[in-house]
C-alpha cells in the first residue's frame, strides 16, 4: 500500500469541521468520498488537526493508504475534480509507511484574525472576528509573552477531554497589526482604523500541540488585555491557577486558520507576517 | 420630509440582488424593513445601481424620504442594528429634496476581480472569478482602450429591455494585476502566480451609465482577448456590429463590485489601484 500525504486548504464556513459528524457535512467526509470516487475503494483519511466548525485551513495535512497506482499529480487534479470548491488540494506526495498525519506532527501554527475597525466589513463575516472597540496590541503582545514556553494550559481549554496531560509548549506567540488581510483593495471607503497601523490584528501561535479551543481561548483572553480589563500579571496568574472561568471568552471560530503543520525534519514556515 | 442619503456596502452572495424579488431576500427589502423598524413608517428606498444576485457593493448609494427627526449619525447606527451583518451602512447624510439616487447619478465605477492562479483559492468562491488559464493583460488593456469613449454598447448587453438608447460613455477602463485582493496574507502556500505581477486582475470601468450585465459582458470578452482568442481589432468590430453573440460570455456575478457612484459636483474616486 502507498501512503499518500495531502496538503489541504479549505473554507470551514459551511462544514461541521474536519471530522465526520452526524449533523452535517464534514471536510473529512468530502475528502473520503472524493478518494472513493477516484480510486474505487472506500478509504479512511487522517488529518493533523481536527478543525472545528467554521474554522479554516490554509495548510492542513492529511494522509491515506491506497493500493492505487495513480501518480501524485493526477491524485491532486482528480480529487479536486470531485471536491467542492471550498476544499482545495494544494499538494500531494507519497511518504513512507510510518508517516501519520496526526501522530507524526511535531508542531502546528495557527493564526487568529481580528478585524478591529468601525464599521464592520460586509465581506468578513465568515473570515475574521469583527471587534469594533480599540485594542492595545502592545499590551496584548507583552501579556502573550507570559504564555510562551512549557506550561499547563488547562485554563485555556473549553472542554477537558480524557487526556494524559494539558501541558503544551508554545514556541511563538506574536500579536501584530496589518493593513491588509483581505478585501482591502476593495475597500476605498472611509473605515476608521483604530490605530495608524491597520485594522487587522493577527495572533500567530506556534506550539507542539494544542488543547481543545486553546487558540480561541487565548485570543479571547488577550482581547481582554487589549481592552485594559486584564493585566499581563493577571493573565500569568490565570495560567498558573488553571481555571477556565478566569480566562476570557472563547473567540469565534470564523477568525481561526490552521496555517501549517510541522513534521520532524521539515521546518514549519516562520509566522513572519511580512513574508506571507 | 427630509431626504436621507445612504452609502452602503454589502456582500451580495446570499441576496437576489438589490431589488425586491418574489424568489428571495433582497438588499432593498432588508433596508426597507430596517427603516420601518427604526422610524415606525413603511418607506420606499431607491438605489443608484440595481446590482444583481451575487454582485457586491462597496459604494452603493441610496436615498429615502422620512418625517423622522432622528439625527443622521443615529440613523446610521440604528439601521445597522436592524440589518444583517452582510449589509453595512457606511455613511448617512441629509441632502436636498431634489436628490434622487438613481436619476441624479452622473457616473458609476465598477470593479471586476479575477483570481488568475492555480490552484483555485478556497476562500474566494463568492468574491472573484477564478480563472486558471494564463491571461495576457497587456493585450486585454490594449483591447479595452477600443471601448473607451461614447459608443452603442448593445453587443455587451445580455438582455435588451425597452430602453431609449444603448449608447453609453466609458470614461476609464483599466486592466491591472495585483498581488492582493483578499486573503493573501493568509496564503503562504505555493500558489502558482501566472505572471510575476500577482494573481489578481482588476478590471475597473467608469462610465456615465451601464447597460444590463455590461461590465460582466465586457469582462468575458476581454478574457477572450487575454486568452489570445480575439484581437483588439476583432473586439472593435464586435462593438461596431452590436451583436451580443459575437462578444464573450457573461462573467460570473461573484467577481463584480459597485465601487462608487458619482453625482454632479462630487468627484468619483479615481479607480487608482494604488490608492485604494
Image: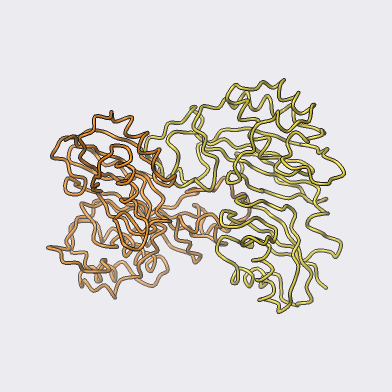
Chain colours: A yellow, B orange
Indicate the position of residue B5 as horizontal and vertical percent values.
Answer: 25, 38
In this rendering, position of residue A174 left or right of residue B101: right
Rendered position, A130 above or below B113:
above
Q: Residue furthest front?
A: B40
Query: Hey, which quadrant is residue B87 in on the image?
Result: top left
Image quarter where the C terminus of chain B lies is top left
How many numbered circles are shown? 0
Indicate the position of residue B136 as horizontal and vertical percent values.
Answer: 43, 62
Q: Nearer the viewer, residue B137 or B10?
A: B10
In this rendering, position of residue A63 left or right of residue B106: right
In this rendering, position of residue A208 left or right of residue B239: right
Rendered position, B133 above or below A52:
below
Indicate the position of residue B184 as horizontal and vertical percent values.
Answer: 54, 48
Rendered position, B201 above or below B154:
above
Q: Residue at x 71, y 21 (%)?
A: A234
Q: Residue at x 61, y 39 (%)?
A: A251
Indicate the position of residue A175 as horizontal and vertical percent values.
Answer: 63, 32
Q: Nearer the viewer, residue A150 or B191?
A: A150
Image quarter where the N terminus of chain B lies is top left
Q: Residue furthest bottom?
A: A40
Query: Hey, which quadrant is residue B76 in on the image?
Result: top left
Q: Nearer the viewer, residue A75 or A220?
A: A220
Q: Nearer the viewer, residue B6 or B208?
A: B6
In this rendering, position of residue B139 left or right of residue A270: left
Amino acid at each position: 500500500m502507498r501512503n499518500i500525504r495531502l496538503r489541504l486548504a479549505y473554507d470551514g464556513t459551511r462544514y461541521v469541521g474536519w471530522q465526520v459528524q452526524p449533523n452535517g457535512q464534514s471536510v473529512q467526509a468530502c475528502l473520503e468520498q472524493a478518494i472513493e470516487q477516484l480510486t474505487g475503494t472506500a478509504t479512511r483519511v487522517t488529518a493533523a488537526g481536527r478543525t472545528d466548525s467554521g474554522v479554516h485551513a490554509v495548510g492542513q495535512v492529511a494522509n491515506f493508504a491506497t493500493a492505487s497506482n495513480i501518480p501524485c499529480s493526477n491524485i491532486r487534479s482528480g480529487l479536486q475534480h470531485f471536491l467542492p470548491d471550498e476544499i482545495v488540494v494544494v499538494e500531494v506526495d507519497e511518504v513512507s509507511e510510518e508517516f501519520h498525519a496526526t501522530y507524526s506532527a511535531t508542531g502546528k501554527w495557527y493564526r487568529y484574525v481580528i478585524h478591529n475597525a468601525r464599521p464592520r466589513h460586509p465581506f468578513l463575516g465568515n473570515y475574521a472576528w469583527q471587534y469594533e472597540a480599540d485594542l492595545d496590541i502592545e499590551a496584548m503582545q507583552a501579556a502573550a509573552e507570559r504564555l510562551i514556553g512549557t506550561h499547563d494550559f488547562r485554563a485555556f481549554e473549553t472542554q477537558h477531554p480524557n487526556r494524559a496531560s494539558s501541558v503544551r509548549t508554545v514556541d511563538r506567540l506574536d500579536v501584530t497589526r496589518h493593513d491588509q488581510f483581505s478585501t482591502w483593495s476593495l475597500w476605498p471607503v472611509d473605515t476608521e482604523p483604530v490605530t495608524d497601523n491597520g485594522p487587522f490584528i493577527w495572533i500567530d501561535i506556534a506550539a507542539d500541540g494544542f488543547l481543545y479551543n486553546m487558540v480561541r481561548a487565548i485570543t479571547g483572553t488577550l482581547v481582554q488585555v487589549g481592552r485594559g480589563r486584564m493585566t499581563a500579571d493577571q493573565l500569568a496568574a490565570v495560567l498558573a491557577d488553571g481555571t477556565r472561568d478566569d480566562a476570557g471568552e472563547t473567540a469565534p471560530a470564523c477568525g481561526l486558520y490552521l496555517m501549517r503543520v510541522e513534521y520532524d525534519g521539515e521546518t514549519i514556515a516562520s509566522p513572519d507576517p511580512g513574508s506571507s
